[in-house]
Amino acid sequence: MSDFIETAPEMNLEPKDIDNLMDELREYHATYSPLFHRREQREQSEKYLNGLLLDIPTKAIEPMVLVQEGADPNEIRARQHFISEGAWSDETILKRHWQEVNQDLGEEDGVFTLDGSDLAKQGDESVGVKRQYCGELGKIANCQAGVFLGYAGRKGYTLLDRRLYLSEEWVEDAAYAERREKCGVPEDIGFKTKLQLSWEMIEAVHKEGTLRGRWLACDEAFGRDTRLLDKVAGIGLWYYAEVPHDTQVWLERPATAVPEWSGKGRKPTRERLVEGEPLPQTVAAIAQAQPAHKWSRHTIKEGSKGPIVADFAFLRVVAVRDELPGPEAWLILRRDVISGELKTYLSNAPVDVPLKTLVRISGMRWPIETCCEEGKQHNSSTIKSESYLTNAGSYIVTDPKAQWH
């Protein structure tokens, strides 16, 4: 028998849940309305918020206005101007959002979640679009790419922040100069990797200090970067990072020493493994070597996927840093009992953390994947620089120009 471990609740709304939706929506908008500089912005933001919840095939501006206001070209232009040219303090709105998330969903052991998400596009008018790897399609394709920071806990989940990824060509190539100007990309913007963009979001939420949380969960696209993991650990978060199967660790800390000087050349200053000490092993090899009694079976509820039954093994290991032993960490091995798929994780959680907690956190990444997928379904328009965040079914409109942090 395996125990059943809850992760985050699904957002399966029933008719009774939306009986007072319009009143709640007005209250929700009133929280952010004072943060817009002008009356027109406050009015348009409320109309746009309502428009995003319309039951229409596409959420482009014109279809929204046709339903809400009729065929009014002035209203269409006003709404388009609000989205493409309007300016307000994006940072201020996001900070207020984090406060609201803490109030509604915040927990001391809340989980920050990190994920990349790409959106396939036609043509070359959208900001940042180019032929690059598209996770949505699983191949090189014309798309926009972004990174997202979310939050999940026992009471629900949401998105916290987002960054649009601009390739080096988009930022530096003269051939893209006209497209940069057309899309409103600032002239002083510099190229940043997805990992750098991810850290900016994590650091911003941490520095604000208004949202409780303990963990940072991410897939191997981020977990393979030890610099990012060390930064996360440095601000006091416990990372729970999926890592590639060829990631190497030591089962015990090997001895290191600075080699004796031979009397020629520079004196060595960097420690090296002592001769005869074992080399690190891949996490896949360690998983294969685990005897049957080291594995325990657990059932995890993972959102729309339903219950997943997996066998787990837990080991304390020594991580590799610059080919030398680094910090101690948990190696968590998770093997699906049906497909046999193996997932491998590293975590800097303390040695006394309950093992069931490590099982639970392994299933806490589905909320951000769901947020991104639902966001794509809602964001079927082709507005060049529109951006929004979902929060319990509602939306926060954010300044398109502020994407270039």
Image (tube, grey):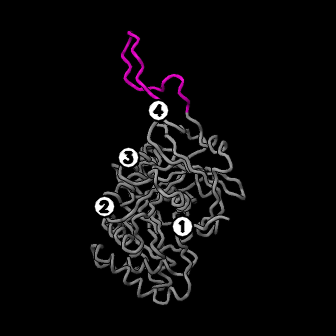
Mark 4 or mark 2, which has the lower sequence index? 2
Q: Amino acid at mark 1?
A: Thr
Can you say whether 137 is above or below 49 in the image? above
In the rendered image, which residue does mark 1 sit on? 7
Q: CA distance from mark 3 to mark 4?
A: 33 Å
The quarter of the image holding the N terminus is bottom right
Query: Which numbered circle lies on residue 190?
Result: 3
Apparent side of residue 363 relative to residue 77 in the rendered image (left or right) = right
Foreground label between 4 and 2? 4
Mark 3 or 2 closer to N-term? 3
Depicted 378 relative to depicted 27: above or below: above
Going by the numbered disc 4, the residue's amino acid type is: Leu
Q: Secondary structure at mark 4?
A: strand
Which residue matches tag 4? 324
Magenta residues span 255-279
- How far apart marks 4 and 2 lie (CA) works out to 35 Å
Please provide percent x and percent y for residue 276.
54, 23
Residue at which label 2 appears: 208
